[in-house]
């Protein structure tokens, strides 16, 4: 079977045919870095991490671009209101770029804990101001935008004459016009559907850049058209993001790309569905937006306990990425038990005494797992096959079924590949625990060195320091003891 991907644009599953194999270009809309990463960030990151890992497993070389939005994303995803970054900067009394750095660091750390692989390129909107202005210029030149009071707006109706605005989200322009209210400052626009591709900065606006239209900042959607074209070319394979970005973000992205570069860029549009909490939409205003840190520590009134990052990851993978997913304490605790059963089963393989013949159909198990993955990354079905296999393994350990030496080894390899490499699930303690253990061991050695010095055993103290230096641990003696740094 060949890999099939559900394409949001054609609304059906299609056989994946990359443009330039073995290289795959994949662009995924990353976070707007203005607050603590929460559950809503985990789902797209894990969904496209699964896609990234599986494409690599199939032998492709994937150039995975995931952007950081650090300017231009205004409140309510509209063309007016405060920039989300600026607002946090004002409230927390920080420089906007401090906000960006702080929450980018936080986002990367949380993704690492969830065992999400870093993308190949992680470009930020503020680092591509020249390229964004060039696209705005090009769209103006091609006649699909107009300038008004220092802002540049995309002319949706003109674009729609020969193109289909709404093709991705399935919306009709007439319905859109009927449902769009005239809002503050929209009198600058010819039509309420038009969107800003360059925005004039009000005097109090913190983030601003010079341009030929005056001081301003790029419209939110421009960065993704620009950065995908810059790193993946004007035609590439996969564009992903959460379903909440389908309209207007991705719809506008298509329009800008066509108006600026002359053609559509994306072959396969992929969208993950949303997460709910106890059946309710999550949101700051609803008081149920739980940050990933709160999930990991259990410190939130809605949480009965803390949940390991791998439990969150496993829970997300237990649903198909196009289905909604409801988080509750019950569901998470069931996932926790399920994951434990999976890893226990894998450990059980080491306790089975090999037999002369095998009752396990390993070939069929592998086939079923990969067929599910080839069917639009159907991880819940793939996982259910892994559990079928675990049943046989447990039976073999109890003497009710049997496995040969050869099958045991193949089974170990298959589970390692499927669980750890493709699904990215690590036995508890391996993700962040390794680092914790390293830290504790270093501190223990340094304590022993201090003790050796106290006992005037300077040979031992020096030996510990030199050997640690050899392993990349730099030890610095300070007034109150020591500090150390790991160089590796
Ligand atoms: Zn985007």
Image (spheres, rainbow, N blue to C red):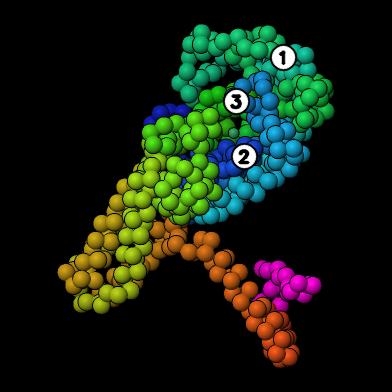
Q: Position of residue 416 (x, y in %)?
A: 40, 63
Q: Position of 197 compared to 319: left or right? A: right
Label 1 near ligand 1 (CB < 8 Å): no
Where is 417 relative to 318, above or below?
below
In the picture of the structure, the residue carrying the numbered disc 2 is 35
- SS class of the residue under badge 1? strand
Secondary structure mostly taken by the magenta-highlighted segment of the chain: strand
In the picture of the structure, the residue carrying the numbered disc 1 is 146
Looking at the image, is mark 3 or mark 1 earlier in the sequence? 3
Give the residue displayed 62% in from the left and 48% down from the top. 106
- SS class of the residue under badge 2? loop
- SS class of the residue under badge 3? helix
Q: Position of residue 228 (x, y in %)?
A: 62, 37
Q: Which residues are magenta?
A: 469-488
Give the residue displayed 57% in from the left and 43% down from the top. 37
Q: Residues within 10 Å of mark 3 (few under 14, many from 20)?
A: some
* Residue 238 belongs to magenta span: no
The circle drawn on residue 77 is 3
Q: Residues within 10 Å of mark 1 (few under 14, many from 20)?
A: some
């Amino acid at each position: 079977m060949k890999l099939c991907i559900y394409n949001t644009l054609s609304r059906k599953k299609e056989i994946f045919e990359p443009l330039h194999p073995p290289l795959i270009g994949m662009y995924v809309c990353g976070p707007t870095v203005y607050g603590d990463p929460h559950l809503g960030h985990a789902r797209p990151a894990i969904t496209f991490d699964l896609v990234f890992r599986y494409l690599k497993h199939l032998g492709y070389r994937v150039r995975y671009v995931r952007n950081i939005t650090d300017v231009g994303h205004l409140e309510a995803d509209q063309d007016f209101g405060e920039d989300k970054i600026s607002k946090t900067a004002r409230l927390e009394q920080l420089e906007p770029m401090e906000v960006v750095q702080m929450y980018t660091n936080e986002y990367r750390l949380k993704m690492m804990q969830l065992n999400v692989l870093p993308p190949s390129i992680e470009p930020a909107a503020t680092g591509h101001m020249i390229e964004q202005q060039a696209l705005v210029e090009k769209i103006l030149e091609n006649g699909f935008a107009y300038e008004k009071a220092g802002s540049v707006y995309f002319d949706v109706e003109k674009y729609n004459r020969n193109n289909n605005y709404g093709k991705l989200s399935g919306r009709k322009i007439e319905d859109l016009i009927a449902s769009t209210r005239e809002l503050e400052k929209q009198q600058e626009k010819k039509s309420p559907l038009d969107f800003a591709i360059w925005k004039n900065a009000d005097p109090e606006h913190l983030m601003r850049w010079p341009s030929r239209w005056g001081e301003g900042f790029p419209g939110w959607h421009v960065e993704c058209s620009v950065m995908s074209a810059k790193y993946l070319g004007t035609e590439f394979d996969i564009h992903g993001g959460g379903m909440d970005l389908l309209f207007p973000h991705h719809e506008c992205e298509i329009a800008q790309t066509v108006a600026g570069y002359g053609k559509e860029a994306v072959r396969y549009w992929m969208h993950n569905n949303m997460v709910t909490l106890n059946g309710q939409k999550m949101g700051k205003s609803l008081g149920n937006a739980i940050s990933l840190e709160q999930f990991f520590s259990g410190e939130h009134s809605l949480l009965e306990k803390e949940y390991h990052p791998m439990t969150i990851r496993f829970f997300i993978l237990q649903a198909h990425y196009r289905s909604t997913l409801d988080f509750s304490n019950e569901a998470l605790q069931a996932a926790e038990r399920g994951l434990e059963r999976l890893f226990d089963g894998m450990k059980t393989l080491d306790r089975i005494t090999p037999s002369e013949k095998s009752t396990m159909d390993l070939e069929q198990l592998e086939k079923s797992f990969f067929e599910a993955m080839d069917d639009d990354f159907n991880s819940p079905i793939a996982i259910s096959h892994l559990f079928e296999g675990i049943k046989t393994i447990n039976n073999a350990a109890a003497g009710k079924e049997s496995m040969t030496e050869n099958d045991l080894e193949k089974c170990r390899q298959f589970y390692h590949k499927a669980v750890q490499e493709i699904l990215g699930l690590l036995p508890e303690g391996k993700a962040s625990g390794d680092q914790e253990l390293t830290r504790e061991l270093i501190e223990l050695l340094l304590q022993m060195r201090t003790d050796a010095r106290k006992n005037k055993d300077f040979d031992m103290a020096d030996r510990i320091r030199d050997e640690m230096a050899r392993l990349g641990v730099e030890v610095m003696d300070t007034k109150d003891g020591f500090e150390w740094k790991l160089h590796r």
